[in-house]
Image: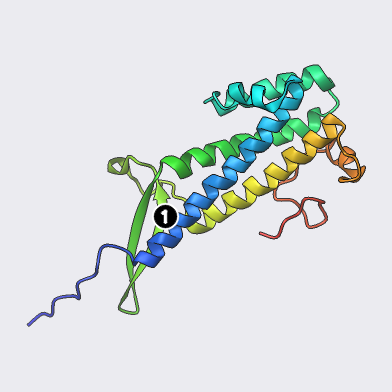
Amino acid sequence: MPVDPPEIPIEPPKELAFQFNALRGISIQFYANYEQALAALFSHLMGAPPDFTGVAFFRINNARARNAMIERLLKKRQGDTYNIFWNSLVKLLGQLDGSRNQIVHWNVVNNISLENGQPKYVLTLRPPNHWDETPNTPEITEDGIKEFIYKCHYLTRSVNVFNSVVSGNLGERLPDAWRDICREPVPYPPPESHLLYLTP
């Protein structure tokens, strides 16, 4: 007589779900930090206090339009001085904005498999239209979210340093080497020799 397979709980363990969703929330906070850095740069380039420029900046819902405005203001303030740096940076910012939309709007999916007869649960993010999934449907894993956090942190620091350079507020806090870095392409991932290198 055939033996029924063991019943596998559909829901993942609560600790696993909490860990994944907490990581997702942390990633959104790191993106918010990046937006604060952009807001500070926008404020400097506008030549107005942040409590005024923030009213406009945080009403801009289109990230591409926001970056284009910053680019135009930078051109008016600095000419072509930082073109190489900014052009490479804005490509990375566009990637970050796209990843942010996925992390915010995609659904948590529970992938269940059997490993040595025991259920294994792996949570990922997938596009909300799960009725249209194919074998090529993209997903974001826990490692993908961690990579997003790392990228947010690195680009936030890059924007903050760039703001210090273009505003002339280097003072004693930052070395003159930043001026040279802000005339070069922004590397990603950064090499270990880079002044903004972070251990993932």
Comparing 128 with 131, the one in front is 128
Comparing 153 with 107, the one in front is 153
* Residue 65 place in picture, x, y as percent: 59, 22
Which of the 4 quarters of the picture holds residue 40? top right
Task: State left or right for residue 152 relative to residue 115.
Answer: right
Comparing 174 with 88, the one in front is 174
Instruction: Name the kind of residue labelled 1 in the image.
Output: Thr
Task: State left or right for residue 139 relative to residue 2.
Answer: right
Task: State left or right for residue 62 relative to residue 129.
Answer: right
* Residue 11 place in picture, x, y as percent: 28, 62
In this figure, what is the number of numbered marks?
A: 1
User: What residue is drawn where x is 48% and y is 50%?
Assistant: 25
Which part of the image, by quadrant, shows the N terminus? bottom left
Comparing 22 with 188, the one in front is 22
Q: Is residue 49 above or below residue 89?
A: above
**Residue furthest toward the left?**
1
User: What residue is drawn where x is 65% and y is 22%?
Assistant: 52
- Give the class, few, some or many, for how many residues have Cα within 10 Å of label 1's Cα (few <14, many ≥20): many
Q: Is residue 148 above or below residue 17?
A: above
User: What residue is drawn where x is 14% and y is 76%?
Assistant: 4
Which of the 4 quarters of the picture holds residue 54? top right
Task: Give the structural element (helix, strand or loop) at label 1.
Answer: strand
In the picture of the structure, the residue carrying the numbered disc 1 is 124
Task: State left or right for residue 154 relative to residue 132.
Answer: right
User: What residue is drawn where x is 79% and y is 16%?
Assistant: 76
* Residue 72 place in picture, x, y as percent: 72, 19
* Residue 87 place in picture, x, y as percent: 73, 30
Which part of the image, by quadrant, shows the C terminus? bottom right
Q: Is residue 69 above or below residue 96?
A: above
